[in-house]
Each structure stands twice: as C-alpha cells, then as structure tokens.
C-alpha cells in the first residue's frame, strides 16, 4: 500500500469529492484500497473484489449497525424518539436469521406478478406527468417527472393516498438527513419529531388495513405469514416507512434523472435510443454502473478480519464505496467511460448478495417505461443552456436535483 492515510482526505459532504469523486476513488483503489477516515470513523473500501468479499460474508461483516450512521443522537432527540414506536430491525440493517425471515415475508410482496401489475399504473402516471409539460418546450425533468413518478407509484403500491405525497416527502427527507448526514444536536429534535409523526401515520394505515384489507402492499404485509410467523407492529412500521416509502423513491428518482442526464450528455445518444429501443435497458444498466446512485453502504466487522492485507479489528465500520467498485479497472476496462454498448455490465448499483435491492425490478421497470415515453414524446430533447444539476451527496446516495431540458413543442 503506497499511501495508508489517503482515506483521511475523503469528504463526502462537500468540496471536490462531491463535484467528482472518481479521480479520488481511482487513487484509493491504486494506493490505499482499505484506508481509514478518522472524521467518519470508517474504513473506505474501494476495490470491487474487496467489496464483493465483504458482501458475501454477512457473518463477519454485519449490516446490523447500518442505521443512523450520520448523526450522533443527542439526549433531547432520544426524548422525542421515545414518543414513537421502538425501532425494529429492517431488511437493510439486519443479519441472518432475522434478515432471512424478514426477506421471506417481504419478498413475496415484490413477486414478478406484483411488479408486472405495476406496468399500467406506471404508464398512466408517467403519461399524466408528461402531458402536463409537453407543450411548454422546456421542463425540469427532476421536479416534473423523475421525482413525482416513483413517489406516486410506490404510494399507490403501498396504499397511501396521493394527497399525502407532500407529507411523506417531508418525513422521508428528514429521515434520510438524520441517518445519512451529520446533524448537530440542536437541529435534531424537529427531525426526530418528523420520524415519530411518520411512524404514527403508518400505524394508523396498518390499523385501517387490518380491519378492511384491500389489494395493496400494506394489506399484504399485515396478513402475510411464513411458517406461521408474521411481522410485528414495529417491524411493519419500519418496513413500510423505511424499506418501502423511504427506500422506494429517492433512489429511483436519482436513477431516472441520471439516465436522462447521461443520454443528453453523450452526443447523438438520444437519437440512437429513439432508433433502437432495445438499447434503453443498456442505458439504464450503464447509468447504474457509471453514475451510481447508491454511493456507499456500511458494514461492521463482527470479529478481527484481514481485508486486502489490512487487519481490521472487531467493531470496525466499513464504508463500501459501490460507486468506486463499479468503475474498478479490475472489473472492466475503461470504467470511467460511459458506454451503453457494454453488454450486461457487472455493477454494484443495486448491491450484491443477501441484501440485493428488493425494489430493483420496480426501479428498472419505471426507468424503462418513462424513458421510452420521453423518447416518443420529446424526440429532440436536449439540455437547456448552462444547466445546473445541483448535485447532492451524502454517505449513501449521490443524486442530481435538477435536469433542465428543452425541445421544440409540437
Ligand atoms: C437494498 C439501491 C430502489 C427497497 C438496496 C441496496 C442497494 C439499493 C444498493 C443494497 C444495500 C446494501 O448493500 O446493504 C437501490 C437503487 C434503487 C433502489 C439504486 C433505484 C434505482 C428501490 C426500491 C425499493 C427498494 C424502488 C422499494 C420499493 C430496498 C430494500 C432493500 C434495498 C427493502 C434492502 C434489501 C435487503 O436488505 O434485503 N437498494 N434501490 N429499493 N432496496 Fe433498493
């Protein structure tokens, strides 16, 4: 290892690493693939092989400590949180055997039939949203399509009225801010209050579906059982609020936006996609690889381990840099180049192993339908002059907040 302290320079919250972290990731992979960052208190793991080794070994690398990696919870915040429900294990922050049980119970809610049944609602919502701006000649595709589409789809699937969209957005934003960024103690109580309000909202939804089930996901989750076991109320709350409503939209919004941004940045690509729609799935996979929405995920060692020749004591926190692993030259040549002609590129965009993203088929379906609709309706779409994408990054997610485009209205 040429530079064991290189990782100390990493700042995922501001500065050049938010602008473009990839030159730094390349240095990390080359000179310090397992390197400690004292500010985060985490080891940065940047190579594809090392990340995969961690992901296939949940016994030694636990997900249980995944929650609240950002803020250090202050006593006043604890007092607010005490007004909510106890925080149960979720899919994302549990290990086997709890994870195996939760995945079995929730997994069937995402069966291929249930995802296929979403095709019509996705198409209808996407069409309604595009109809609202197609005559205007310009739009911000994040705020006018990439954000509302996945939110409305997941709300519809879960069984939440669309009038509650703004509240859910507010609660989810606060939830992510609390767990994935560093919030000072004095700013925490309102965020904790948001989480408690969100929990009570979901608890009311659960009660309503228990007494009058419909065909939505909440009804499925409250009635499902596997080998005689079902989800407890705190498990249902975190599953619905965290694993579905929160995990199910922000990431998909970012994927949609980043796909269209890449399609606009590459000369002639929009035209190529219009002429050959079989390339659209390649655009989606290459975006997941090249412009990874899930930037990093956390694991904790349960015992002393050796990773790439570095001894990590038990209790070490690792930040697995999926975005870096997906561009590793050991995985593919020329990984810093966006190229949709790669066939089935391997990437870590949806994770790997037992925690592989539950919502991946839904996200891919939304991206496919919405991209094809834009290709149909805005054939000469291009970036607006001097676009400001407003890139946001935290420990887990990297996303653009604006995608200003224009076209010739018909
Ligand atoms: C897990 C990314 C969409 C629900 C994951 C993981 C990644 C990921 C990387 C693995 C985390 C780990 O390694 O610990 C994404 C991206 C999405 C997306 C990039 C959109 C483009 C969705 C959607 C849903 C969802 C639409 C639900 C509606 C989940 C859940 C897990 C998960 C529940 C935890 C699975 C488990 O631990 O067994 N996602 N996700 N995701 N995702 Fe997604």
Image (cartoon, rainbow, N blue to C red):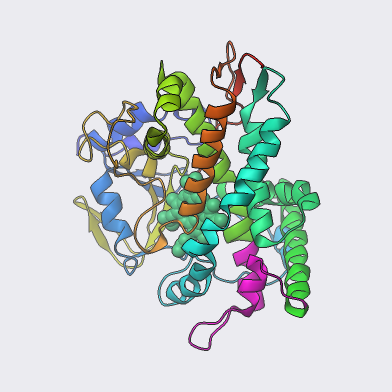
222 falls in the magenta region: yes
- At horizontal 33% and vertical 44% (from top left) the residue drawn is 347
- At horizontal 61% and vertical 31% (from top left) the residue drawn is 401
Q: Quadrant of the N terminus?
A: top left
Q: In the image, is 64 to the left or to the right of 232?
A: left
Tell me the magenta residue range.
Answer: 212-240
Q: Quadrant of the C terminus?
A: top right
- At horizontal 47% and vertical 35% (from top left) the residue drawn is 11
Q: Nearer the viewer, residue 117 or 177?
A: 117
Task: Please provide percent x and percent y for residue 38.
Answer: 42, 44
Indicate the quadrant where residue 37 lies.
top left
Q: Residue furthest bottom?
A: 228
Residue 344 seen in this snapshot: yes
Q: Nearer the viewer, residue 320 or 274?
A: 274
Q: In the image, is 107 to the left or to the right of 331?
A: right
In the image, is residue 218 above or below residue 264?
Answer: below
Task: Please provide percent x and percent y for residue 374.
Answer: 56, 30
Indicate the quadrant where residue 222 lies.
bottom right
In the image, is residue 308 above or below residue 324?
Answer: below
Task: Please provide percent x and percent y for residue 187.
Answer: 72, 46
Q: In the image, is 379 to the left or to the right of 269?
A: right
- At horizontal 29% and vertical 61% (from top left) the residue drawn is 56
Task: Please provide percent x and percent y for residue 367.
Answer: 51, 41
Q: Nearer the viewer, residue 373 or 283?
A: 373
Residue 66 seen in this snapshot: no
373 falls in the magenta region: no
């Amino acid at each position: 290892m040429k530079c064991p302290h290189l990782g100390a320079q990493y700042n995922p919250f501001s500065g050049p690493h938010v602008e473009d972290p990839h030159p730094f990731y390349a240095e990390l992979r080359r000179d310090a693939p397992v390197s400690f960052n004292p500010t985060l208190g985490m080891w940065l793991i940047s190579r594809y092989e090392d990340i995969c080794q961690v992901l296939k070994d949940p016994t030694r690398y636990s997900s249980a400590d995944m929650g609240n990696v950002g803020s250090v919870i202050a006593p006043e915040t604890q007092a607010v949180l005490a007004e909510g429900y106890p925080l149960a294990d979720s899919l994302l922050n549990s290990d086997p055997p709890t994870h195996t049980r939760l995945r079995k119970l929730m997994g069937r809610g995402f069966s291929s039939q249930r995802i296929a049944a979403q095709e019509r609602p996705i198409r209808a919502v996407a069409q309604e949203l595009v109809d609202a701006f197609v005559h205007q000649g310009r739009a911000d595709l994040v705020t006018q399509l990439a954000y509302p589409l996945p939110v409305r789809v997941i709300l519809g699937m879960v069984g939440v009225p669309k009038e509650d969209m703004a509240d859910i957005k507010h609660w989810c934003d606060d939830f992510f801010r609390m767990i994935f960024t560093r919030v000072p103690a004095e700013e925490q109580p309102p965020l904790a209050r948001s989480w408690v309000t969100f929990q009570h909202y979901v608890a009311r939804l659960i009660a309503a579906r228990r007494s009058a089930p419909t065909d939505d996901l909440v009804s499925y989750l409250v009635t499902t059982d596997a080998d005689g076991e079902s989800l407890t109320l705190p498990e249902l709350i975190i599953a619905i609020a965290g694993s579905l409503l929160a995990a199910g939209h922000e990431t998909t919004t970012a994927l949609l936006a980043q796909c269209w941004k890449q399609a606009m940045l590459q000369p002639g690509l929009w035209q190529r996609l219009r002429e050959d729609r079989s390339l659209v799935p390649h655009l989606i996979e290459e975006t997941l690889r090249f412009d990874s929405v899930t930037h990093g995920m956390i694991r904790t060692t349960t015992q002393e381990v050796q990773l790439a020749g570095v001894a990590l004591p038990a209790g070490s926190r690792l930040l697995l840099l999926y975005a870096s692993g997906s561009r590793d030259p050991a995985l593919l040549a020329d990984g810093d180049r966006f190229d949709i002609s790669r066939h089935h590129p391997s990437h870590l965009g949806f994770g790997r192993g037992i925690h592989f993203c539950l919502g991946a088929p839904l996200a891919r379906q939304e991206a496919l339908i919405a991209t094809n609709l834009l290709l149909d309706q805005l054939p000469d779409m291009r970036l607006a002059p001097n676009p400001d994408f407003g890139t946001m990054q935290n420990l887990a997610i990297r996303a653009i907040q604006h995608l200003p485009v224009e076209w010739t209205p018909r």
